[in-house]
Image: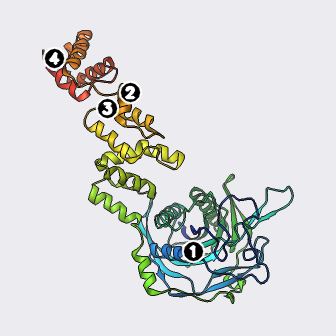
């Protein structure tokens, strides 16, 4: 009898603000330890927090992008626990009155197709500091630069049924948040972190005991960690054991999960409203204006590319993976290039540079000029790729580069006829076979003419001349 996997994800997203959640310290990444701190984020006596308006706006935008109901009144609470990198002894978060609830997103999964995953809540909170275990041998160091960094915690409903679905959900969630301008969502820089809850049960039975997996630094490792924890729970239950509610860490090197501690419940944190912060009250008209101001989100953009530009679904998926890719593609189309041709350039040479450097190396207008040269037969597609390589990092005219490199296709009939005649004279056996009915040899002759012309002959203009000469 099979086991059913039940997964729910809690995602912590750093909001794209320049300052922290309750003070004016910058949120810049990579500063020397304990250099971007102040009495508020250090939790010094008498320091009073003030909510960051931009963090609130980005939290609202994220909630709206996820289809949540944003509440006009929410409350900041103190989440009490002790940890060395939590200087106040509590974290300012939201509990029973969060910013937003009851959203959902649609996710394309490898096993069940399109599924709808519920969003239980999105609430605002501050981050803790960071414990560093590898700086001082035998000791743990504390860096409080991240203390107070603004976060949105997004709690998903347990609608996911496999580790692969969890990865697909995270990919879709990240894409939505990046499109909405809420966060850069970089796991490498710590601006997106995932806590994964998993339990197993026999189909139709009540939910099993869930465990929580932490310490995952990529979506691939989230999937690996969940696979490892699912296997651990199934093996334990089939051996007659009992799953305990624990928090685990994932070792990416070994692919194993390890128990860290017993899992806390909400009552362990002794939540109560923060007396230093009044309720967060949002104007209904302002909320409506924020909703209207949402940018075009990925699903809508994909639909427009399919319907208005008649692109294949695969192409639209690649082109809308990141806002920068979609914007670059649309700029090439706006410069006069056929959408499919523009898509081919973006998915080929364009993405090669984007994936390596995070930016496109050739201006959209120059790509449009290059595509026009190919369409007009001025240069071949192969030559155009060479020209593109020459344009990287430079604002040069594609036609000037083509002429400098000798890549402009020869269309002058006299020159083409001379090359064709020379090829026919050099291959009498192939000519006889062609005239004997081997029509596929036309490709051989075109290749030989291109070779003789050093790639400068226009292949479209070659064929009628070849067919005329070979007809005998």
In front: label 3 or label 1: 1
CB contact under 8 Å: marks 3 and 4: no
Q: Secondary structure beneath disc 3? A: loop
The dot on residue 404 is 2
Residue 315 visible in this rendered orientation of the protein? no
Q: Nearer the viewer, residue 344 or 4?
A: 344
Q: Where's residue 82, x and y in %?
A: 78, 77
Label 1: which residue?
55
Q: Secondary structure at mark 2?
A: helix
* Badge nearest the viewer, 2 or 4: 2
Residue 196: tell me if it is visible: yes
Residue under the point 46% across and 76% down: 64
Name which of mark 2 and mark 4 comes first in the sequence. Answer: 2
Q: CA distance from mark 3 to mark 4?
A: 24 Å
Q: CA distance from mark 2 to mark 1?
A: 53 Å
Q: What is the number of the mark on residue 469?
A: 4
Mark 3 → mark 1, Cα distance in angstroms: 51 Å
Q: How many marks?
A: 4
Which of 66 and 361 lies nearest the eye of the viewer?
Answer: 361
Which label sits in the foreground, 2 or 1? 2
Give SS at disc 4.
helix
Q: Residues within 10 Å of mark 2 (few under 14, many from 20)?
A: few
Residue receiving disc 3: 380
Of tags 3 and 2, the one toward the viewer is: 2
Real-space Cα separation, disc 2 to disc 4, in angstroms: 33 Å
Whether residue 281 is situated above or below residue 133 in the rendered picture: below
Task: Tell me which label, 3 or 4, sits earlier in the chain.
Answer: 3
Earlier along the polypeptide chain: callout 2 or callout 1? 1
């Amino acid at each position: 009898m099979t086991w059913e996997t039940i997964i729910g994800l809690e995602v912590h997203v750093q909001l794209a603000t320049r300052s922290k959640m309750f003070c004016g310290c910058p949120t810049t990444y990579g500063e020397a330890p304990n250099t971007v701190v102040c009495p508020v984020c250090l939790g010094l006596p008498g320091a009073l927090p003030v909510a960051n308006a931009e963090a609130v706006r980005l939290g609202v935008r994220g909630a709206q992008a996820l289809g949540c109901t944003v509440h006009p009144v929410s409350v900041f609470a103190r989440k009490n626990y002790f940890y060395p990198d939590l200087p106040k002894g509590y974290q300012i978060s939201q509990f029973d009155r969060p910013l937003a609830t009851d959203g959902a997103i649609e996710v394309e999964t490898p096993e069940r197709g399109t599924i709808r995953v519920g969003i239980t809540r999105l609430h605002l909170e501050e981050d803790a500091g960071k414990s560093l275990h590898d700086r001082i041998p035998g000791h743990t160091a504390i860096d409080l630069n991240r203390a107070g960094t603004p976060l949105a915690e997004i709690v998903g409903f347990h609608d996911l049924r496999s580790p692969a679905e969890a990865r697909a959900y995270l990919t879709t969630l990240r894409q939505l948040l990046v499109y909405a301008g809420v966060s850069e969502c970089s796991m490498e820089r710590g601006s997106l972190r995932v806590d994964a809850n998993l339990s197993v049960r026999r189909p139709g039975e009540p939910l099993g005991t869930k465990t929580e997996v932490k310490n995952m630094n990529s979506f691939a490792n989230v999937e690996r960690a969940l696979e490892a924890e699912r296997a651990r729970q199934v093996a334990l239950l089939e051996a007659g054991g009992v799953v305990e509610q624990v928090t685990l860490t994932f070792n990416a090197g070994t692919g194993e999960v390890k128990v860290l501690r017993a899992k806390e419940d909400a009552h362990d944190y002794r939540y109560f409203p923060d007396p230093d912060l009044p309720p967060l009250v949002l104007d209904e008209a302002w909320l409506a204006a924020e909703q209207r101001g949402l940018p075009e989100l990925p699903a809508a953009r994909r639909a427009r590319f399919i319907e208005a530009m008649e692109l294949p679904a695969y192409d639209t998926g690649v082109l809308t993976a990141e806002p920068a890719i979609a914007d670059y593609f649309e700029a090439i189309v706006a410069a006069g290039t056929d959408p499919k041709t523009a898509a081919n350039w973006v998915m080929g040479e364009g993405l090669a540079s984007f994936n390596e450097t995070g930016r496109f190396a050739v201006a959209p207008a120059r790509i449009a000029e290059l595509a026009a040269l190919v369409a007009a037969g001025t240069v071949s597609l192969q030559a155009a790729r060479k020209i593109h390589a020459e344009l990287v990092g430079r604002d040069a005219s594609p036609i000037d580069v083509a002429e400098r490199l000798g890549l402009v296709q020869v269309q002058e009939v006299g020159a083409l006829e001379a090359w064709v005649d020379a090829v026919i004279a050099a291959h009498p056996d192939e000519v006889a076979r062609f005239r004997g009915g081997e029509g596929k040899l036309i490709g051989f002759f075109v290749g030989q003419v291109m070779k003789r012309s050093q790639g400068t002959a226009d292949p479209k203009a070659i064929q009628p001349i070849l067919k005329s000469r070979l007809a005998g």
